[in-house]
Image (tube, rainbow, N blue to C red):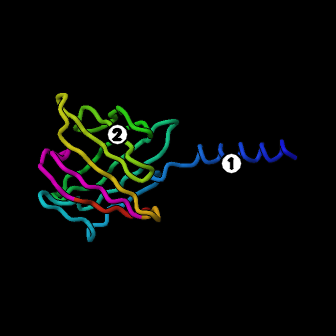
Amino acid sequence: MRYVKLVFMFLAVAAALVAADPFVGTWKVNPAKSKFKTGVAPKEQTVTISESEANLDIAVKGTAADGTPISTHYTVPAGGGNGKVVESPYEAVSGKRMSANERETSYSKGGKVVYTTHAQLSKDGKTLTVHSKGANPAGQMVDGTVTYDKQ
């Protein structure tokens, strides 16, 4: 009986370790809840986050306020660290995990961080709020918050 309890305990721990990252999913911008001090929110945007081994694979597609297409794709370690740019105007990307529901991502050009995002997931896991500051992919200075709804 003691061994059965031990097996169940190990299974419970293993299940917790392989649980999906709370950021994983498809997120669509909610323009009504997005606010900017400088710059403008995208007209439409979808962020798809999936897990690939120990990395998060992040693809961003959409349309900027001026009608130009938005397309970025990169991977970052789920626990934080330097990532790999697949498609982006930025040369490098790195992530930092602040907590289970909070992350920060820095984007660099020429060895210098030019854009930073701070993402906060709601307690119910249905809303993702991302504060962005710096030079966006189009090179425009922005300081604002974009709200995404989980699909």
Q: Can you identify the residue that label 1 sits on?
A: 12
Q: Which residue is mark 2?
A: 95
Q: Residues within 10 Å of mark 2 (few under 14, many from 20)?
A: many
Magenta stretch mostly in which secondary structure?
A: strand
List x then y, in percent, for residue 94: 32, 36
Residue at x 35%, y 38% (from the top left corner): 74
Find out whether residue 134 is within the magenta segment: yes
Comparing 69 with 28, the one in front is 28
Q: Residue at position x 32%, y 51% from top?
A: 61
Q: Secondary structure at mark 1?
A: helix
**Residue type pointed to by label 1:** Ala
Identified by mark 2, the residue type is Gly
Q: Are marks 2 and 1 in contact (CB under 8 Å)?
A: no
Location of residue 58 in the rendering, given as x and y in whole percent from the top left corner: 39, 44
Residue range of the region highlighted in magenta in the rendering? 127-144
Q: Residue furthest front?
A: 2
- Residue 38, above or below 49: below
Q: Is-magenta flag for residue 149? A: no
- In this view, the residue in front, 68 or 52, is 52
